[in-house]
Image (tube, grey):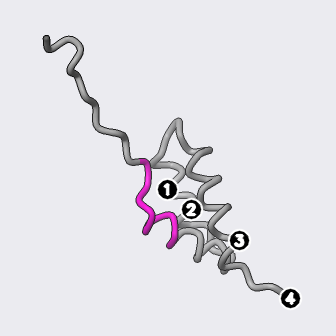
């Protein structure tokens, strides 16, 4: 029956490349890409923001 065979495609909030680019920019004190991705994510903006912040640690210069 078609009732139980409904498969939904997962919603892509932001691609890995987009998150990576925003994280690199954020590490250079440029939040414009991160802001754009979070705005586009709508109600999932916190998830996207945390993904960007987490990845930006890898690109932050260490003293």
Give the residue drawn at x 28%, y 31%: 8
Question: How dense is the environment of label 2, judged by Cα within 10 Å: few (below 14), some, or many (20 and up)?
Answer: many
Compared with 4, 63 (above or below) is below
**Residue 34: image tag:** 2
Nearer to us: label 2 or label 4: 4
Q: Tell me which numbered mark, 2 or 4, is placed earlier along the sequence.
A: 2
Residue designated by label 3: 57
Q: CA distance from mark 2 to mark 1?
A: 5 Å
Residue 59: x percent and y percent? Answer: 66, 79
Secondary structure beneath dot 3 equals helix
Question: How dense is the environment of label 1, judged by Cα within 10 Å: few (below 14), some, or many (20 and up)?
Answer: many
Q: Tell me which numbered mark, 3 or 4, is placed earlier along the sequence.
A: 3
Compared with 3, 33 (above or below) is below
Examine the image and state in which quarter residue 63 appears.
Answer: bottom right
**Residue 11: image tag:** none
Does the magenta stretch mainly form a helix, a strand or a loop?
Answer: helix
Residue in the foreground of this view, choosing between 54 and 1 = 1
Q: Which residues are magenta?
A: 13-21
Residue 50: x percent and y percent? Answer: 65, 53
Residue designated by label 4: 63
Residue designated by label 1: 37
Query: Are dots 2 and 1 in contact, CB under 8 Å?
Result: yes
Q: Name, please, the residue furthest toward the left.
A: 1
């Amino acid at each position: 029956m078609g009732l139980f065979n409904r498969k939904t495609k997962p919603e892509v909030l932001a691609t890995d490349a987009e998150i990576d680019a925003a994280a690199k920019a954020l590490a250079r004190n440029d939040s414009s890409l991160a802001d754009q991705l979070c705005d586009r994510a709508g109600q999932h903006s916190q998830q996207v923001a945390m993904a960007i912040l987490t990845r930006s640690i890898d690109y932050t210069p260490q003293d």
